Image (cartoon, grey):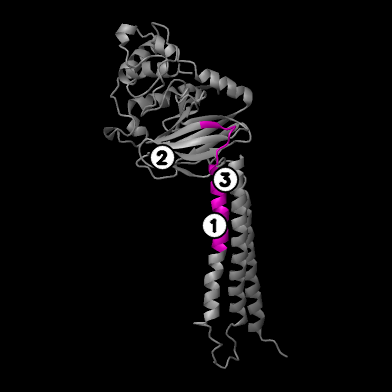
Amino acid sequence: MSVTPRSRTRPAVTRIIAGLMLAALLAAGAGCAAIRDDEGRPLNSLSPKGPSAQEIDDYIVQVFGVAGIIFVLVEGGILFMAWRFRHRKDDDGTMPVQTHGNFGLEIGWTIAPAVILAVLAVGSVRTIWDLEERDADALTVEVIGQQWWWEFRYDLDEDGTPDIITANQMVVPAGRMIDLDLKSNDVIHSFWIPELNGKKDAVPGRTNNWRLEADEPGLYQGTCTEFCGLSHAYMRAEVKALSPADWEQWLEDQQEPAEVPAAGTLAAEGYAEFQTLCASCHQVNGFDPDADPQETDGVPSPDYRAGNVPLAAGNAPNLTHLMSRNRFAGNLFPLYAENGEGELVPNESDLGDWLRNPVQKKPMAPDQRRGMPNLNLTQEQIDALVAYLVTLQ
Ligand code: CUA
């Protein structure tokens, strides 16, 4: 039988196309494998670093397994049928048997997906219930979403009054389950630390149960994932997991009131400015914002020293130990920066810019009591305030 040039080129083209498709599949597969490596990807939900995230990841693998089998069956069927029933030169023009309206088939492909989805739903709901469970040995942290930052409160003696209030960075002991009481002060937010847990809404007027645990000490990044207005994209958070010794030290340090700067220093000037300009929103434990600074001469009220006055949970971050954190303003701007000699020093430049015009640094609506207002400070006031803020270790 003679072979025409045309029928010889066709399989060659088909082989090239098949080769290209295989290469594309391999490239996609390699890309997926690379995603599981979290280098440079702080919000990677495919690299679990704790039991809650691991449970979600295990379930994702199961769902992808089922979806993968269905994909291969459906796409394989399409390719097979396109090839098997392709147009041939010797076609006599008769139509193949038509299946439109076939009762058995239509019932079949309606019920089969419903059953598959029902099975997957069981796994989904079971995973969500697991992640909401409370743990008797867990440490409870109240997590409060605000426009546009996260507050964390620790009631260590469980007397109903928080002993530590911090912002932007939630500090936890590594290897211990943390029960989260998720709340909101204004609109709906959603708390998400991808390497430690899935997303959970923080809803005003409600407390949602959620939990997380970090296997190892380290920093784990997160972000708000429910649109909550102007600066939703700039509402970040960070979990810092500590070794047992570092955790005990942190607890001790955080319960100390702030030091009052020595008289005559620039920081002392900033402290006085802070009391008149900032203390109506920002709490610094160690002095009573209601006390008249003239009367107390800048000395913390004895009640605050003794811990008799509850920490105020306000509409602005508690700044008592500001410089113990990594970032400020919704975990956006670094609190430390490298100086000329490569040492980490307080980032006075960003702190100063923030005080000069916060709305320019981050979109906010202070006229609607959403975010920090521009106080039209003078450069002298800014310098004094920054000098005071960096003392808040
Ligand atoms: Cu808070 Cu989006």
Mark number, residue 121: 1
- The residue labelled by disc 2 is 206
* Residue 346 in sight in this render: no
Q: Nearer the viewer, residue 129 or 117?
A: 129
Amino acid on which disc 1 is placed:
Ala
Majority secondary structure in the magenta region: helix
Which residue is at a point 62% across and 81% down the rendered structure image? 84
Please tell me whether residue 288 is drawn above or below residue 117 in the rendered image.
Answer: above
- Would you identify the image quadrant in which residue 386 lies? top left
Please tell me whether residue 204 is drawn above or below residue 3 in the rendered image.
Answer: above
Question: Is tag 2's residue or tag 3's residue first in the polypeptide sequence?
Answer: 3
Q: Find out whether residue 139 is within the magenta segment.
A: yes
Q: Nearer the viewer, residue 236 or 362?
A: 236
- Is the CB of mark 2 within 8 Å of ligand 1? no
Are there few (<14), some (14-19), or many (20+) residues within 10 Å of tag 2?
few
Q: Relative to 45, is 143 on the left or the right?
A: left
Please tell me whether residue 120 is drawn above or below residue 45 in the rendered image.
Answer: below
- Which region shows up in magenta? 116-140
- Would you identify the image quadrant in which residue 315 lies? top left
Amino acid on which disc 3 is placed:
Asp
Amino acid on which disc 2 is placed:
Arg
Mark number, residue 199: none
Residue 128 screen position, x and y as percent: 54, 48
Which residue is at a point 58% across and 54% down the rendered structure image? 123
Q: Element at badge 2?
A: loop
Q: Element at badge 3?
A: helix
Are there few (<14), some (14-19), or many (20+) residues within 10 Å of tag 3?
some
